[in-house]
Image (cartoon, helix red, strand yellow):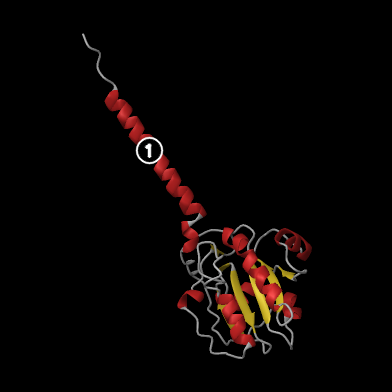
Amino acid sequence: MALPSNKPLKTKLVIGWLVLLAGLIGMIFWQTAWKYSLPTPLPSNYHDVPRGASITMPASAEWTMTANKPLFLHFFNPACPCSRFNMPQFRALVQQYGQQVAFAIVVMSPEKYTAAQLQAKFDLPYPIPVLSDSAIAAACGVYSTPQAVIIGMDGRLFYRGNYNRSRYCSDEKTGFARQALDSFLHHNYSLTLSPMAFRAYGCQLPTCRQ
């Protein structure tokens, strides 16, 4: 008498494992890549700060404003992959425009980072002032990282937006922050950029989540 075949059971088990594996791969891809290419959801309590608005910096950061240089604020979150991958773009801007622009890093994270620690970790060309007051983000209308903010010598917001447009904020070809700096330094204040420059994406503040 022939024994019953267990092939249907084996087939179901194989299919089940394949489905589970595909789900795990999809989850990993979502967590590490795809979600960072989507626009960051606008917070329900978000208060927009329009371009040209006068920026009132909190007392902790008033010293960053200078009468003879525009201020470039780099909003950085160590827990955000986009922020970490984006650091070479920020470093390149510092190297190119450091004589003409005042740079500062705004660390949007519970951890404390000194200028020396960030300089060593990301090989910055010289120590950059590091700020950790979350009120700076609200003052500039920033709700994700990484984001670039340019404030003119008159204290008005010239640019708030993305460094570029790519999955990990690391594409030099779209270079929105660089284009904005060039426009300001060449006194081209109309600032005609792609709409993608102004739709924030990356990691939500205050923590790295999407």
Query: Is there any visible trace of residue 65 in the rendered image?
Result: yes
Q: Mark 1 — residue?
A: 18
Instruction: Give the x, y percent position of residue 74.
Output: 65, 71
47 sits left or right of 149 in the view: left
Residue 133: quadrant of the picture: bottom right
Q: Residue at x 32, y 27 (%)?
A: 10
9 sits left or right of 180 in the view: left
Q: Residue at x 76, y 65 (%)?
A: 115
Q: Residue furthest left?
A: 1
Instruction: Give the x, y percent position of residue 143.
Output: 56, 70
Residue 125: quadrant of the picture: bottom right
Instruction: Give the x, y percent position of residue 138.
Output: 60, 74
Query: Is there any visible trace of residue 156 in the rendered image?
Result: no
Amino acid type of the residue that numbered disc 1 sits on in the rendered structure: Leu
Q: Residues within 10 Å of mark 1 (few under 14, many from 20)?
A: few
Q: Nearer the viewer, residue 30 or 182?
A: 182
Compared with residue 209, is residue 26 higher up or lower down, i.e. above or below?
A: above
Residue 182: quadrant of the picture: bottom right
Instruction: Give the x, y percent position of residue 149.
Output: 61, 77
Number of callouts: 1
State which quarter of the image contains the N terminus.
top left
